Every structure is written in C-alpha cells, then in structure tokens.
Image: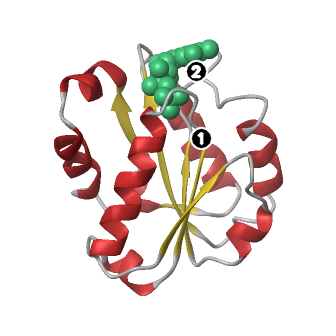
C-alpha cells in the first residue's frame, strides 16, 4: 500500500503505554504525522483504553516499550492486549515502541501475536526506536524519523 494512504482514509486511534516518555514521544510524532497527512488522530493512554477504542477506529496504532525481559509492560499493557486480542481481527495495526538494550524480540513477538489475532501489521513490521539514539537526537529529528515512516 502507498505510504500514508491508510491514514489519509481513516481515523487513527493511537493507544500507548509509556513509563518515562520515550514511547509517548513516538505516539505524539505519529499523531502529528497522521494529522499532517489529513487523518483524524486521537492519543489514548493504555490506562484509559478499552476494546471500544479499537472497534471505533478503522486504523489503530499500539505503542509499548520493551519491558520485563523483552516483554510488553505487564500491569497495564499486557492486560489491555489480552482484551484487544479479541477485537483487532481485520484491523490494520501500527505497532511502535522504544527499547534500550535488547534485540527487539518484544516487537517481533508482538507482531506475531497481532497477526495471529487476525490483524494486519502496517508496513509488515513495528516501528522501534532505541533509547540512546533517541536521546542523541533533537525532538524535530526524532519526529521526522517516525513520521517519515507513516
Ligand atoms: C523495568 C524495565 C525493563 C526493561 N526491559 C527492557 C528489555 O527487556 N529490553 C530492552 O531493550 N529494553 C528494556 N528496558 C528499557 C526500555 O525499553 C527503554 O528505557 C524505553 O525507552 C522505555 O520507554 P518509555 O520511556 O516509553 O517508558 C527496560 C526498562 C525498564 C524500566
């Protein structure tokens, strides 16, 4: 699919968990990119999200950093994903998240999980930003990195 075409067509709900703000910055950049492309975008924290936020949107973005040992955050995001597992079939899902030192296994597991649920992972893979690289860059450059992929 042509880059950006999906989000021009639909409302995008961007649901994310972030402990120290890196994944939140990615979520904000994705929302900005979606709006620049003409889409409606809503930022929803995982703490307040539910399956209704998925049912209501044609396209969704899900964000969570690598936590635990290459896992989704387990107190908020993992239970939310268990709820969403039954609601995302047929949706196109942008996956994104920040990580620190691993090899990205959490994202590959998440891609497999979402695909098994019957959803399509946008662009075939999640968007990952490593923390130390993000810290080196200025905010506009960081946003450029993410929005250029949306
Ligand atoms: C408890 C904890 C566990 C983490 N586990 C991993 C990990 O397994 N692999 C990894 O690459 N980074 C890991 N990290 C680093 C975070 O993924 C990284 O700091 C990320 O940028 C945090 O995103 P946030 O600012 O959105 O919370 C961990 C961080 C914390 C605090």
* Quadrant of the image occupied by residue 58: bottom right
Q: Quadrant of the N terminus?
A: bottom left
* Quadrant of the image occupied by residue 131: top left
Residue under label 2: 70
Up/down of 86 relative to 70, above or below: below
Marked residue nearer the N-terminal end (1 or 2): 2
In the rendered view, how is the structure colored?
Answer: secondary structure
Residue 62 location (% of width, % of height): 56, 52
* Quadrant of the image occupied by residue 36: bottom left
Residue at image coords 51%, 27% = 20
Query: Which secondary structure lies at badge 2?
Result: loop
Q: Is mark 2 within 8 Å of ligand 1?
A: yes
Side of 47 where 22 appears, left or right: left
Residue 53 location (% of width, % of height): 70, 68
Mark 1–mark 2 Cα distance, whole angstroms, equals 10 Å
Side of 95 where 115 appears, left or right: right
Residue 24 location (% of width, % of height): 48, 42
Up/down of 28 relative to 127, above or below: below
> Is the residue marked by circle 2 packed among few (<14), some (14-19), or many (20+) residues within 10 Å?
some
Residue under label 1: 110
Residue at image coords 44%, 16% = 102
> Is the residue marked by circle 1 packed among few (<14), some (14-19), or many (20+) residues within 10 Å?
many
Residue at image coords 75%, 28% = 74
Query: Which secondary structure lies at badge 1?
Result: helix
């Amino acid at each position: 699919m042509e880059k950006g075409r999906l989000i021009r067509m639909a409302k995008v709900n961007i649901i994310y968990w972030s402990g120290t703000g890196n994944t939140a910055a990615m979520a904000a950049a994705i929302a900005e990119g979606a709006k620049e492309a003409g889409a409606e975008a809503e930022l929803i924290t995982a703490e307040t999200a539910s399956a209704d936020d998925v049912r209501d949107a044609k396209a969704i973005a899900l964000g969570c950093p690598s936590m635990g040992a290459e896992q989704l955050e387990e107190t908020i995001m993992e239970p939310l994903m268990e709820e969403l597992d039954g609601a995302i079939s047929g949706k196109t899902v942008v996956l994104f998240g920040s990580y620190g030192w691993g090899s990205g296994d959490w994202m590959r597991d998440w891609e497999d999980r979402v695909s098994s649920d019957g959803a399509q992972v946008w662009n075939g893979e999640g968007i990952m930003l490593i923390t130390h690289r993000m810290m080196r860059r200025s905010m506009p450059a960081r946003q450029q990195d993410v929005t250029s992929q949306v």
